[in-house]
Image (cartoon, rainbow, N blue to C red):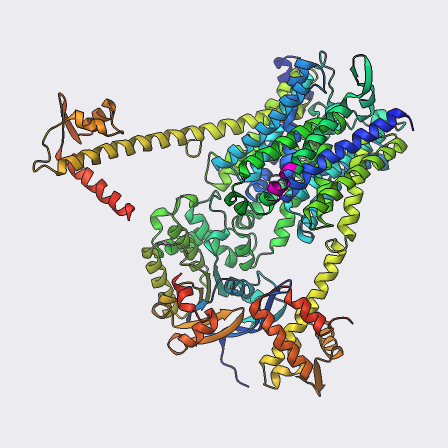
Amino acid sequence: MDLIDFFTNYTLRTITLGTAILGAICGMLGSFAVLRKQSLLGDAISHASLPGIALAFIITGVKDPNLILLGALISGLIGTFWIKGITKRTRLKSDTALGLILSLFFGLGILLLTFIQKMPNANQAGLDKYLFGQAATLVEQDVLIMASVTGVSLIVLLLFWKEFKLLLFDPDYTKTLGFNTRFLDILITFFIVLAIVLGLQTVGVILMSAMLLAPAAAARQWTNNLSTMIILASIFGALSGIFGTAISATQNNLSTGPVIVLIAASFVLISFAFSPSRGLIFREMRFRKNRKELHLKKTLTFMYRIAQNHDNISHPHAIRILNNFQGFTKKSLLKLENQELISLSGKQWALTKKGYEEAASINKKLGKSDD
Amino acid sequence: MIQKKYAIQIDDLTVAYNYKPVLWDIDLLIPEGVLMAVVGPNGAGKSTLIKAILGIIKPIAGSVKIFGKPYKKQVNKVAYVPQKGSVDWDFPTTSLDVVMMGTYGSLGWIKRPGSKEKKQALEALEKVGMLEFKNRQISQLSGGQQQRIFLARALVQNASIYLMDEPFQGVDATTEKAIINILKELRKAGKTLVVVHHDLQTVPEYFDWVTFLNVKGIASGQVKEIFNDNNLTKTYGINYKVAINK
Amino acid sequence: MTSAQLEIQIIAALVAMACAIPGTFLVLRKMAMISDAISHSILPGLVLGFFITNDLNSPFLILLAAITGVVTVVLVEFIQKTGLVKEDTAIGLVFPALFSIGVILIAKNANDVHLDIDAVLLGELAFAPFDRLEVNAIDIGPKSLWVIGTILLTTISLLLLFFKELKLSTFDKGLATTLGFSPLLLHYGLMTVSSITVVGAFDAVGAILVVALIIAPAATAYLLTDSLKKMLLISCFLGVFSAISGYWMANFLDASIAGSMTTMLGIIFLIVYLFAPKRGVFSVIYKEKHQRIEVSLLVFLLHLQNHVEIEERHVDHLQKHINWGKVKSKTILDLAQKNNLIKLSGNIVNLTEKGTEFTEEALRYITTNKETAIEDLKAKFFLFRG
């Protein structure tokens, strides 16, 4: 299959639309998870939904995607509340609780899946796709469900926007203003679980958490505004979904989940590196520039201390005497001259009036911070 | 029995964590219109007292009344300034946005802040001298500036009672002056202020009312009457002067 | 029982023990999720190693994959240090990306490589006995038995050698540093051991279930004991027990061995979580309820001692000011009366002599703030025994 097919093919359009919507809702709700410091909760929930998928099939005996989603939702919610119970009632910390639920539920799920494989009607199960996701199995009805859930969560988000924002920033304060924080908390958790469950068919149990985190983590780097962050995260999520599906559809033998995750991860990588305000590259550049300026300042104050011993501040001195001083280079001297802080002539330098005053004020500041 | 109307009336309040008492049988009457410091050593339960008044922490016994009614019915009469360290300052939002949050309580569920609320927030920012930083991301503010933002957020709540948890912690001298001036102004306007405070030396200068607390309530009253060696010793122990200067 | 069955059980038991030991320290150091990250992100290392050696049990492959595990830890810590995202987000970003690379590598080379996704997720414990190790053409047992045996022996020797250091750095990092043990060295040592164990166990139980073998026995043991030594022993025992019982369950259900082992661990954890004598949910709820009543009684007695005014000691005051409901007020009053601490004259409550003495002692306890003192106090006055 090549790329031209991709845009003309009806099935593929449906699938692409589905993954785009999924990416958007994950980016949106993932932003909440990231800001609430519950990044790994998504990982636990998605793994915890596996036994629900298997049990739904064992109990009903048919492979109805809606029933399977329901099973996943119930088992995901049980996992979530058990995690809360473990951290609240026992001495185990949240990381242990997450790891426990994640691995134990997943183990049970695997047991049930392998059990199903031996059942007489196993052929129609095809539950394997829930492990790594197979976007190709999305049909129009799935996309409709995704779209309506996204619509509902968007409405809820807009309706309670103010309350959610407050809760994310300062839960105690939210309580003192008279808002029911427990209600808000359950509402947010419910939608996060719902988004995860929706993504299982496309991205799979194992990698679903990345779908939640990566777009939000990337978006956070570009903005300091919550609504912009959520919009950006939705866009990043949708793009990861679209490109991921496109790439995996044009290749044989490739599950959608890993491809989508890698695309989302490259968004993160690019954002970490190139974001203008927080990115590592610009941060390093700023750091170097500051260090250079510090060097110039040091050189200048060194000169100032020499010049102080003379009546005429602009008395020329040999460059040679700076040799004892570590910070100076030809380049830094030229830079100082460019800034009209010193004047150079041959092998001599002299402070200008401007340079002297500048150095005096730096010296004063340095003296202060030394105290 | 005719009772004088108190801003906050605390009866037999006890908060315990397991068997460890944090607050024990506190009876406290806070008259309307005082600027009160709550002092006591570390672990005396000062923050817990504030949180128990606000209903953030559930007490094991006792009751708190705000102007004679439970807190839940008086939410809009009380403003809260939490400790600066209690929130994540890397949260993606601006100073103005945080101050606007103070209006959310009176707005109630779902209703959005409009131009009226924005005006209130800008006024509060101006009052605390932070107007020029209104669009600044909150992580880029200094400790003192963050504290001013929290104060401004409480100001827009337009409450009758202000509960503040260490508003002077980690702020520069200018900010401290600015904050105390605002607090004094609020008291002049008839508001009641309860401030958890660390620096005993400034108590007589800043406050007119004081409560000594060390798990149990030790004394509460006018600064000029009860701020003395006797109560300080009862609260901080015999070596209280050493303890303070540390 | 055939010899293959026996061998599978021995391998499973050894894997469980090898996982339980580093697991104990990871749980205590609040780093349980790191094992999740390692177990996923070693996959690309494993696949690359497999391309080169074509043998899942080759020492070179194990080394390469273990290095990937340590690199993951370093990468996570690097991202955390940049401060660009909150701490656990760093973990959540790194391992899915690396795992995805591994999965894609396998899928793209599916025709050339005999390594399939199921093996990655579930392990191939059932096939372990068929891959034999031969020395001089003499069969000396399954390869994976030797691999995991070596790893376990190394882990145990390291544990015995550095037990003191590990214990100290786990419970008191500051002290460990001042005593000259490098917490950093121990940290990366533990990470290396964990990585190697994960790689060794991977073959048997797969990527995700190895996490269960690491975390669950240790977490369960932590609900049963306070001593590190006992915790290590209990978690090893639980690991071995679930390995063997899991094997027979899988045999019975004709399902995945690794899945059954994990499910056994889950059942054990659930039982302990609910019924552990001191730290189980039921005993915690029971204890909390009792504690609330006991503390309430103390509050009440102190209140009586504090106030001489009649109206403060009226029975109604309990409900009105102390703000207790009717039932609670009655419980407390009854308890105090039963213990002979108060006397009722009409509706006014008075402390008895014993009550006064008790209250004074309790007050002393409150001011000194010693948590154990209350137990002595309770014993001394034969309180709260119904």
Query: In the rendering, at what x and y percent does residue C136 appear?
Result: 79, 12
* Camera-nearest residue between A243 and A330: A330
Question: Outermost residue, bottom direction?
Answer: C346
Query: In the rendering, at what x and y percent does residue B27 appear?
Result: 54, 75
Total marks placed: 0
Instruction: Name the main secondary structure of what is drawn in magenta.
Output: helix
For the point 67% across and 44% down, the residue is: A190
Q: From this view, report whether residue B210 is shown above or below residue A173.
A: below
Magenta-highlighted residues = C161-167
Residue C2 seen from this side: yes
Q: Is residue C238 left or right of residue C179?
A: right
For the point 73% across and 80% down, the residue is: C340
Query: In the rendering, at what x and y percent does residue C279 appear?
Result: 72, 54
Query: In the rendering, at what x and y percent does residue B215 appear?
Result: 54, 68
Residue A16 seen from this side: no
Quadrant assignment for the N terminus of chain B: bottom right
* Camera-nearest residue between A316 and A136: A316
* Camera-nearest residue between A310 and B133: A310
For the point 67% across and 52% down, the residue is: A88
